[in-house]
Image: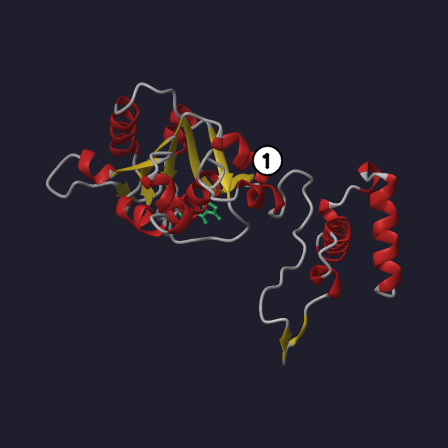
Amino acid sequence: MRIEIVSLFPEFVAQVAGHGVVGRAQERGLLSLHGWNPRDYAEGNYRRVDDRPFGGGPGMVMMIDPLRACLEAARAADPAPARVVYLSPQGRPLTQAKVRELAAQPRLVLLCGRYEGVDERLLAAEVDEEISIGDYVLSGGELAAAVVVDAVARLQDGALNDAESAVQDSFEGDGLLDCPHYTRPVEHALGEVPAVLLSGNHALIARWRRQQALGRTWLRRPDLLDRGTLSPADHKLLEEFLAGAGH
Ligand SMILES: Nc1nonc1C(=O)N[C@@H]1CC[C@H](O)C1
């Protein structure tokens, strides 16, 4: 998979996304990141990329032509069809389902805004979809792009040493939150490890983990739990969990 990063700070994303799983995915040739800076495509002595907003108001807006020329160069860099994504609070929320959809694309162009944002005419002409990583305002879209790169990279075949961990992660598969995790030492001043995890009984361990995932989702993110789609076994596990938790 190839990802073009269109940004006034293109090296930013490569630095943030160059470690761990994402760095390894790049080393394994599963993913390549390519930075493109609209300032390299701006005209004039000052290579202007932004200007004041029509209608007045604070801040600056990114201009059409440097971005348009930059996007054209990024598209032309590879024959694979590219999905152009603009990161912005006005976008649809990034979910694991959306990550899976993006991870299946041969190529992505991630457009990172700065200042107040981008001239709407450029967005209408060039962008396939807007995506938000959350309901807050960042100083630039680069961190959001790095989030997309990380989430997409780990889903590339061969990126994770233990493919199972991608399935067990929160939101994978059934959309539940992840169960709690423990590791050595068994005894610690901060508490003990649940005995079931030391039992060696894999069926009981799987049951406990499923019950914890259901219970934690119900307690922390009930919006993710559509009880109507739960199996009878899951209903029973959840009821048992809630009874034990005094709910
Ligand atoms: N939340 C978000 N999810 O994706 N991007 C953002 C975000 O805050 N972007 C900034 C808004 C103005 C500046 O141009 C960049």
The quarter of the picture where the N terminus appears is: top left
Q: Residue furthest left?
A: 45
- Type of the residue with mark 1: Ala
Please report the residue visible at 10 percent of the width from the left and 41 percent of the height from the top: 45
The reply to whether residue 56 is in sight is: no
Which of the two residues, 59 or 205, is positioned nearer the viewer here? 205
Q: Which residue is mark 1?
A: 97
User: Residue 179 at what x, y percent from top left?
Assistant: 68, 55
At 76% from the left edge and 54% from the top edge, which residue is drawn?
208
- Residue visible at 74% across and 65% down in the picture: 195
Protein image colouring: secondary structure
> Which quadrant of the view contains residue 74?
top left
- Dot 1, crowdedness within 10 Å: few (<14), some or many (≥20)? few
Label 1 CB-ligand 1 distance < 8 A: no
Quadrant of the image containing the C terminus: bottom right
User: Residue 6 or 97: which is nearer the viewer?
Assistant: 97
Tell which residue pokes out farthest to the bottom in this image: 189
Which element type, helix, strand or loop, lies under badge 1?
helix
Q: Is residue 155 above or below residue 147?
A: above
Can I make out residue 89 in this image? Answer: yes
Q: Quadrant of residue 87?
A: top left
Q: Is residue 173 above or below residue 115?
A: above
Q: Is residue 16 left or right of residue 11?
A: right
Between residues 92 and 3, which one lies in front from this camera angle?
3
Q: Quadrant of residue 231?
A: top right
Residue 148, given in percent of the width and then of the height, sits at 45, 42
Q: How many marks?
A: 1
Residue 37: x and y, percent? Answer: 24, 39
In this picture, is 191 found above or below 235?
A: below
Q: Nearer the viewer, residue 18 or 4?
A: 18
Residue 229, position in %: x, y?
Answer: 81, 36
